Image: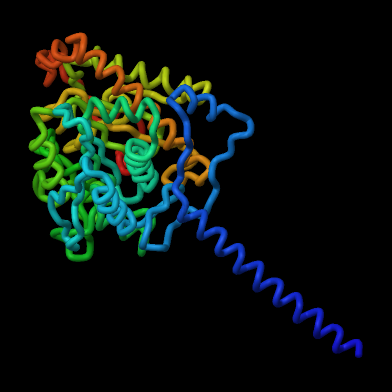
């Protein structure tokens, strides 16, 4: 009799466990499928919400394995991002997807256009040029999400004044490879002159400064088997070639550019190839100052630094911020987002902090840009010969650390 009682108790426990597990699974799935929305009126409400003691970030599994939808609260592989871009283009009549090329592994290179007010002033944002910097894709996708699916005064202001061109994944092959094979992969996946080594560092493959570097460093320092291999010639990678064509397509209309990277909390501008300060350095300084003010308002403090790549980091050649600044628009920035403690793997509790802080930073930057365009200050700065100054070249090659420090970002 006692043994039968034990069997009944055990059976009941097993049934209870199965039912509870199924309920938890369905509840978690419904959370995944719900849209990440916060009905806030404007940026000031966001500041208040950020400081609220009762405010808690959504804390859900950070890897999305369901290919059918995009999870705005965590990391996603390439296919959900692609599908979400096409979904948004079908949902909104002022949103379009432009395919500007294909990768070596035949993945589409996609840019999302948001131009509700049919404006000519282009704001160009891109991320995931380096495959392992997953958080930067979260930032650009959430910027898209907030522009389209939030009815805030700030979103309305941005949509009324700018044409956005946003590329969430510059390097789809490398990004997918980090999800399937090697989490810390940096480059693309195209073959090189070394059969055993694949990949070109897309952010060392642009035209500006490339010739100055080529041939001056050894194979061990910048060869095909290194993380920062620049390719056998400028624009040799399909990713850099496609992005360059798109940049030049909107060259006359482009007003502002950001290339998102991680990590370090650094706001960078040209130049990295040499120590020339841009002629519009005072203008760039105003935008750096606005960033610091925004970070202080959001977080109560800030640990950001800013300046030209050569001085703040080290000398590096063929980078996109130099290329865009010289050939396309003087207001070009590389933003290194994230704390040193997290490196390339911030926990989900901090990802949302970075997402909201970068959204608010973008709002403040573009409000400053609009005010300068209205006052004529932007046109005045743009007429400067911002390509170079007469400053004497220094002989320093790496500003801080050794040459290996160039591998990190």
Q: Is residue 216 visible?
A: yes
Seen from the viewer's position, the closer of residues 33 and 178 is 33
- Residue at 41 percent across and 45 percent down: it is 344
Kindly identify the residue that appears in the image at 17 percent across and 10 percent down.
Answer: 376
Coloration of the structure image: rainbow
Question: Is 221 in front, or is 327?
Answer: 327
Query: Residue at coordinates 29% horizontally, 23% vertically from top-left?
Result: 366
- Residue 405 in view, yes or no: no
The quadrant in which the C terminus is found is: top left
Q: Where is residue 64 drawn, in percent x and y?
A: 43, 58
Q: Quadrant of residue 269?
A: top left
Residues 92 and 407: in front is 92
Q: Is residue 318 depicted above or below 69 in this figure? A: above
Quarter of the picture holding the N terminus = bottom right
Q: In this view, does 156 lie above or below 192?
A: above
In the rendered image, residue 276, in percent from the top left (x then y), is placed at 18, 20
270 or 171, nearer to the observer: 171
Residue 119 shown left or right of residue 67 in the figure: left
Rendered image quadrant of residue 118: top left
Q: In this view, does 18 lie above or below 300?
A: below
Q: How many marks?
A: 0
Residue 176: where, in percent of width, then height? 31, 59
Q: Residue at x 36, y 64 (%)?
A: 180
Q: In this view, does 218 lie to the left or right of 132?
A: left
């Amino acid at each position: 009799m006692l043994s039968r009682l034990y069997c009944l108790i055990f059976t009941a426990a097993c049934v209870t466990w199965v039912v509870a597990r199924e309920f938890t699974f369905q509840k978690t799935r419904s959370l995944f499928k719900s849209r990440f929305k916060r009905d806030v009126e404007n940026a000031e409400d966001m500041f208040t919400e950020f400081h609220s003691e009762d405010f808690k970030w959504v804390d859900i599994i950070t890897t999305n394995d369901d290919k059918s939808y995009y999870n705005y609260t965590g990391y996603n592989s390439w296919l959900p991002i692609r599908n979400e871009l096409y979904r948004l283009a079908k949902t909104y009549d002022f949103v379009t997807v432009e395919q500007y090329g294909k990768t070596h592994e035949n993945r589409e290179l996609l840019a999302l256009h948001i131009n509700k007010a049919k404006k000519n002033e282009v704001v160009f944002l891109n991320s995931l040029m380096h495959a392992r910097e997953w958080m930067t894709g979260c930032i650009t996708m959430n910027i898209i999400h907030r522009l389209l699916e939030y009815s805030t005064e700030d979103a309305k202001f941005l949509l009324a004044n700018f044409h956005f061109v946003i590329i969430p994944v510059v390097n789809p092959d490398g990004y997918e490879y980090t999800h399937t094979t090697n989490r810390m992969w940096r480059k693309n996946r195209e073959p090189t002159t070394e059969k055993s080594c694949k990949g070109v560092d897309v952010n060392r493959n642009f035209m500006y400064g490339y010739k100055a570097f080529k041939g001056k460093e050894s194979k061990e320092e910048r060869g095909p088997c290194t993380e920062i291999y620049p390719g056998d010639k400028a624009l040799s990678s399909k990713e850099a070639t496609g992005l360059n064509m798109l940049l030049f397509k909107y060259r006359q209309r482009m007003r502002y550019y950001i290339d998102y990277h991680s990590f370090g909390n650094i706001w960078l501008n040209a130049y990295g190839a040499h120590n020339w300060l841009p002629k519009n350095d005072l203008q760039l300084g105003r935008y750096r100052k606005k960033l610091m003010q925004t970070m202080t308002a959001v977080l109560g403090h800030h640990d950001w630094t800013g300046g030209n790549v050569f001085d703040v980091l080290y000398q590096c050649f063929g980078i996109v911020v130099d290329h865009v600044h010289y050939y396309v628009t003087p207001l070009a920035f590389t933003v290194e987002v994230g704390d040193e403690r997290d490196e390339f793997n911030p926990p989900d509790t901090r990802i949302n902090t970075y997402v909201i802080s970068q959204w608010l930073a973008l709002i403040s930057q573009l409000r400053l840009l609009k005010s300068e365009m209205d006052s004529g200050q932007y046109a005045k700065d743009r007429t400067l010969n911002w390509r170079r100054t007469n400053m004497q070249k220094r002989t320093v090659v790496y500003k801080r650390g050794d040459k290996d420090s160039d591998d990190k970002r």
